[in-house]
Image (tube, helix red, strand yellow):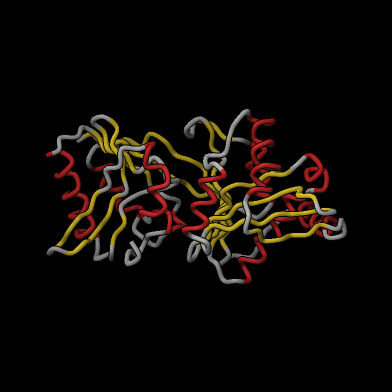
Amino acid sequence: MNQSENGTFLFHRDFMEYHKDRFDDHSLLVFENEKIAALLPANRKAAELHSHGGLTYGGLLIKENRGHAYLESLFTALCAYLKAEPLERLVFKSRPSFYTASPYREWHNFLIRNDATLYRSDMSMAIDYQQPLQMGKSKLKRYRKAENEMLEVIQEQDFTPFWKEVLEPRLAEKYEAKPVHTLDEITLLNRRFPKNIQQYSVYRDGCIVAGITLFVDKYVVKSQYGATTAEGEQLRALDYLFITLILKFKAEGKYFFDMGTVSQKEGKTYNPGLLKQKEELGCDMYIQDFYSLPL
């Protein structure tokens, strides 16, 4: 994985194993002359192979791109194996294009030519640091105002204050939902990947009012969780934290700041309020496609 041109830390086995009890792992290696040429993180569901359901994005990890014919040969070998299993379908999850220089359109072309169906297309929002920042004037005005509200941003080593005092109560109150990761799970993953999984929180008068959990890779920073208390909402503390972090990682030379999807109901609709919020923070839209390939 470390030698692939399109891998991220999410594909490390130490990351994927934290929820191994939830998935029937069936990840595959493609070899060329007894050397690993590609890897497909995957899990099995009955007679189907899925790009790993425990990961935000997937796809075929390749050691190097040697042109269209080579990439097609990798996929042809993969499909031949799946048919021999026998499996009936490959459910392939791509990733937003800003995560990799790998040839996404090559996979799209191969899949469509082999009768795959594009069954879902999610709207993913990210800031391209190669372009001038385009934040809304109202966001910047509130950011400057928040600077005078005695708000303190800190990077925390303990995820407990954010999880227990902000994230879990807020998700339960607003959506009757829970975070995908439990506190124990995110703490375990942070211990395994301390540079990649980071927690930033906003405090006022010693009390936490907002926080953002980040997944930080070589070129891309992803906002995995963001939430605020009722007091923090009044203070616009989450926007203040987002802008602080956006500026921080731009200065550090990252390429993209990923603010996640706004799609709902498996891509059939989207949250217009969330879309507007992310656009006002400077995001553009990128597409994450999902395919179903009969074998």
Position of 9 with respect to 171 (left or right) is left
What residue is rendered at 73% in x and 51% in y? Answer: 239
Position of 237 with respect to 192 (left or right) is right
Relative image position of residue 64 (x, y in whole percent): 28, 66
User: Does 64 appear above or below 164?
Assistant: below
User: Does 152 appear above or below 124?
Assistant: below
Relative image position of residue 35 (x, y in whole percent): 18, 64
Position of 148 with respect to 135 (left or right) is right
What residue is rendered at 53% in x and 45% in y? Answer: 184
Position of 80 with respect to 26 (left or right) is left
What residue is rendered at 32% in x and 67% in y? Answer: 3
How many numbered discs, if any? 0
Using the image as rendered, state which of residue 112 and residue 92 is in the foreground: 92
Quadrant of the drawing holding the N terminus: bottom left
Quadrant of the drawing holding the C terminus: top left
Relative image position of residue 179 (x, y in whole percent): 57, 39
Using the image as rendered, state which of residue 217 and residue 15 is in the foreground: 15
Using the image as rendered, state which of residue 209 and residue 101 is in the foreground: 209
Relative image position of residue 22 (x, y in whole percent): 39, 36
Considering every residue shown, the one lying at the far bottom of the view is 252
What residue is rendered at 47% in x and 32% in y? Answer: 266
